[in-house]
Image (spheres, rainbow, N blue to C red):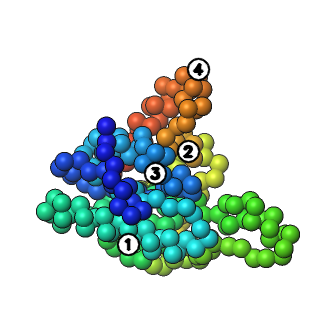
Amino acid sequence: MAKWLRLDQTWCSWPSKPTALIEMIGGSYLAASPNISYKRLLNALRKKNIAIHAWSYIPSLDHQAQANEAWKGLRKCRLKLQERMGSSDFNPIRLGHSLGCKLHLIAPDCGRKCKSFIGLSFNNYNADKSIPILGKLKKKFNIETEFSPSPIETMRIIGNQYIQPKNLLIKFSNDKIDQTHLLLEHLQSRSKDETKVIELKGNHLTPATPNIREVLLDEMSNYDDRNNNFKLLIDTIYSFASE
């Protein structure tokens, strides 16, 4: 069983001799306890001798502030790992799911301090659609609410400032809120872009650990299919991380 250590807002799991490091930022609310919400995904990657750092947070409207905070927290844990291993060879692979993709992509280093980026189920909707109650408050009190940066500004930042060429975007066949096509368009607008896109079977929550209700339903229906989809996701992430 994987052991987890919490350093400030980051959950860390270290094999005895890791060959790689993944820095994970999950989606809204799932990322409050990533060691639980993404337990199956992260433990499977750790079993492949990859060190895991997963930043925990409750989403706010100020995504830029949270991206900066995540970058600082993950950097602090990376330095701790390097000190423990007596090595500075850990050039991290950044892994994001849903909102976590955006937070990685608008990090203050613009993608410089990582080996590559893997984005699962990217989306970039405005605040009213992401948090329906804000739309109701907007109408009732005539107030403006939006994420910072806004969806439009986010794509401008990615197209103009994000410099990491090596990116893998994974979308799922039954994901109704995926906007990978939008991200791909802006990444490919940059020079020397090497972004790849893969579509796998599954939905927006495929990367997350299933809850008890889902497990019970799967026992009666598509348990084997779900396991096969998940295994393919792990193999795809590991293959790209090993390049």
Instruction: Give the number of the mark in front: 3 or 4.
Output: 3
Where, by quadrant of the figure, is residue 196 drawn?
bottom left
Which of the marked residues, 3 or 4, is nearer the chain's N terminus?
Answer: 3
- How far apart marks 2 and 4 lie (CA) works out to 19 Å
The mark lying in front, picked from 2 and 1, is 1
Q: Secondary structure at mark 2?
A: loop
Q: Is residue 51 above or below residue 73?
A: above
- Using the rendered view, name the quadrant where residue 202 is placed: top right
Q: Which mark is residue 205?
A: 2
Do the residues under discs 2 and 4 have CB atoms within 8 angstroms?
no
Q: Which residue in the protein does label 1 denote?
A: 72
The residue indicated by pointer 3 is 34
Mark positioned earlier in the residue sequence (2 or 3): 3
First along the sequence among labels 1 and 4: 1
User: What's under tag 1, amino acid-wise?
Assistant: Lys
Q: CA distance from mark 2 to mark 1?
A: 27 Å
The residue that mark 4 highlights is 220
* Residue 188 appears in the rendering: no
Spot occupied by residue 82 in the image (x, y as percentages of width and height): 20, 63
